[in-house]
Amino acid sequence: FFRPLEKIAAVIETYPRGIAGFQRYLDLMAETPDIEDRPDAREAPALTGNIRFDDVHFTYDGARGVLHGVTLDVAAGETVALVGPSGAGKTTMMALVPRFYDPSAGEIRIDGIPLGEMTLDSLRRQVGLVSQDVFLFGGTLRENIAYGRLDATEDEILEAVRHAQLSELVETLSAGLDTVVGERGVMLSGGQRQRVAIARVFLRNPPILLLDEATSALDRTTEREVQAALARLSVGRTTLIIAHRLETVRHADRIVVMDGGRIVEIGSHDDLVARQQAYFSLLG
Ligand code: ATP
């Protein structure tokens, strides 16, 4: 059983140039045979990342509706935090962006292009994902970072390492970037794995970023490092964040409050606090 974002994580991370993950990718795709390139699909151009949800409805099982007419226009480069109670549909909404599922009604467009008109490959290459469940394979740290872009130069890798706040870790490892990580090597902590995912996205440089903020507790220093790296990663990219922390929410350009598969409020932190409605009551 996979939650949708874990599935996307696996697909996005393994899809562009699968190494060890290719079989896993095939297995995952076999679970969703209905998502494939349409016959008329074309290679997407370089996207700026304006994402528009237009009256989007969704059901997983054909019976129970999970999204009930979601309409949202996210400007290129904007950071939007999705908040709301468990089961509100936040993860599902994000899962529709790389077309892990198709809406049952309504449409999603990026830069005005309906998702179904782009090839899955050209769409997913332009969507980066950082979630709590990072897929690392047994190889060196360098291989794990360069995963999505095997042609990256040493300088580019080092820059991604710096941006992802991994430099200190690399310095403490005796073999540096050539240290084998994973079960047969150095085990990385949750916060370190998350930063490897951040480094991957820096290297791949996609215009769209999907962030599922970790709920698991990281120590305060790690937490600050991860937050700083994420803040930097989102600059200049359209970013959708499932936000669990007030700090993150405050910094978003807009906050979208979801409940029961609907958007119930949209606004800045200050706007929504002043309204004293759904968002205000979530703050507790
Ligand atoms: P949380 O904050 O707990 O992650 P969420 O707001 O992200 O919640 P979703 O994960 O989008 O909510 O779930 C919305 C609804 O869809 C829930 O009722 C959930 O049980 C259901 N759901 C989620 N994933 C699946 C799936 N793969 N198959 C069937 N139902 C699912």
Image (spheres, rainbow, N blue to C red):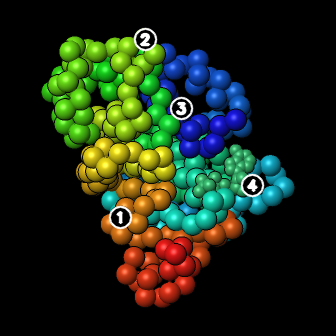
Q: Quadrant of residue 270?
A: bottom left
Q: Depth check: 201 or 162 in front? A: 162
Q: Secondary structure at mark 3?
A: helix
Image quadrant holding the N terminus, namely: top right
The label nearer to you, 2 versus 3, is 2
Q: Secondary structure at mark 4?
A: strand
Query: In this rendering, would 88 be left or right of 152?
Result: right
Mark 1 or mark 2, earlier in chain: 2
Q: Which mark is residue 247?
A: 1
| Structural distance between the alpha carbons of marks 2 and 3 | 21 Å
Could you classify mark 1 by the number of other residues whose Cα lies within 10 Å: few (under 14), some (14-19), or many (20 or more)? few
Mark 4 or mark 3, earlier in chain: 3
The label nearer to you, 3 versus 1, is 1
At 47% from the left and 59% from the top, the residue drawn is: 244
| Structural distance between the alpha carbons of marks 1 and 2 | 37 Å
Q: Which residue is mark 2?
A: 184
| Structural distance between the alpha carbons of marks 3 and 1 | 28 Å
Identity, as a three-letter code, of the amino acid under mark 3: Ala
Q: Which residue is mark 4?
A: 59
Mark 1 or mark 4, earlier in chain: 4
Q: Is residue 161 above or below residue 150?
A: below
Mark 3 or mark 1, earlier in chain: 3
Q: Secondary structure at mark 1?
A: helix
Identity, as a three-letter code, of the amino acid under mark 2: Arg
Q: Secondary structure at mark 2?
A: loop
User: Where residue 103 appears, x then y in whole percent?
Assistant: 67, 54
The label nearer to you, 1 versus 4, is 1
